[in-house]
Image: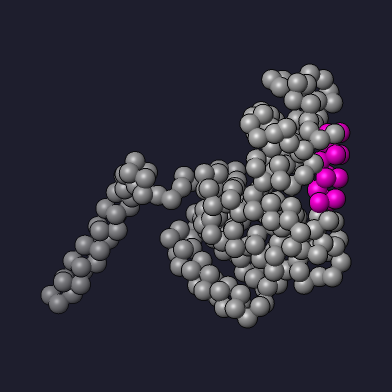
Amino acid sequence: MKRWPSILLLVLAVACFWFSGVQQARLLELRRAHRLTPGDPLENAPPLVAFTTVALGGFRGVIADILWVRSSTLQDEGKYFELVQLADWITKLEPQFPEVWAFQAWNLAYNISVLFNTPEDRWRWVRSGISLLRDQGLRYNPAEAQLYRELGWLFQHKIGADYDQAHAYYKQQWAGEMMRIFPGPRPDFARLLPEPADETAAETDLHLRRDYKLDPSVMREVDERYGPLDWRLPQAHAIY
């Protein structure tokens, strides 16, 4: 007879778990309807990111918090190289956490780059910080103004200003990248828009959109409003 209370409690627990599972879908719909969910489910995410966001569920936030505390300690200790791997893990766990993308890009472009003596090595890390924000951070957080600001700051301050000893090399390298896509100070918007007029214009359009996430129509709008701009210079990309 003493076993019956235990059996009843076990049955009640199973029933509660079943009921919570049934209600989960409805609760998720309510969270999205009232905008209580930080973001929509990730689409076309790399397998590792998709796995961690689904398999770990809410526990990934706890793990990310622990790693974030550890990263703050490494920052205070000046262990910037260790921060690279740690921040990468955090972005895999919480890809829609914009602060860590900004933190990681700053670490690459500012903290790590200045540890090297040659302009070539410094530029590689600065370029990595730009690519991280533009190609990954904004991919998962397209509406986060903070990341756009950070990206613009890298162009305006890190490349466009003269505070870094290798700033002239950065400007030269960026201008070279742009000149491999279009000759002169700006693309030929008349040939690009509304549709590429020929094969060369189509290739230019492809490179701008795919490799640099630049929309030629927005470029022309910015150019008409604030220009004419020289798109070989980092300042134009900071405005964009």
The residue sitting at 70% across, 65% down in the picture is 110
Residue 177 painted magenta: yes
Chief SS of the magenta region: helix
| In the image, residue 79 above or below residue 212 | below
Total numbered circles: 0
The residue sitting at 79% across, 26% down in the picture is 188
Q: Is residue 106 left or right of residue 28?
A: right
Closest to the observer, 220 or 55? 220
The residue sitting at 61% across, 75% down in the picture is 75
Residue 209 painted magenta: no
Quadrant housing the C terminus? top right
Judging from the image, the colouring scheme is: one colour
Which stretch is magenta? 171-183
Residue 237 drawn at (x, y percent): 70, 43
Closest to the observer, 16 or 125? 125
Q: Is residue 45 left or right of residue 235?
A: left
| In the image, residue 23 above or below residue 73 | above
Residue 158 drawn at (x, y percent): 71, 57
Q: Residue furthest bottom?
A: 77
User: Is residue 41 at all visible to an observer of this figure?
Assistant: yes
Residue 238 drawn at (x, y percent): 67, 46
Residue 175 drawn at (x, y percent): 83, 45
User: Is residue 209 at all visible to an observer of this figure?
Assistant: no
Closest to the observer, 70 or 55? 70
| In the image, residue 190 above or below residue 2 | above
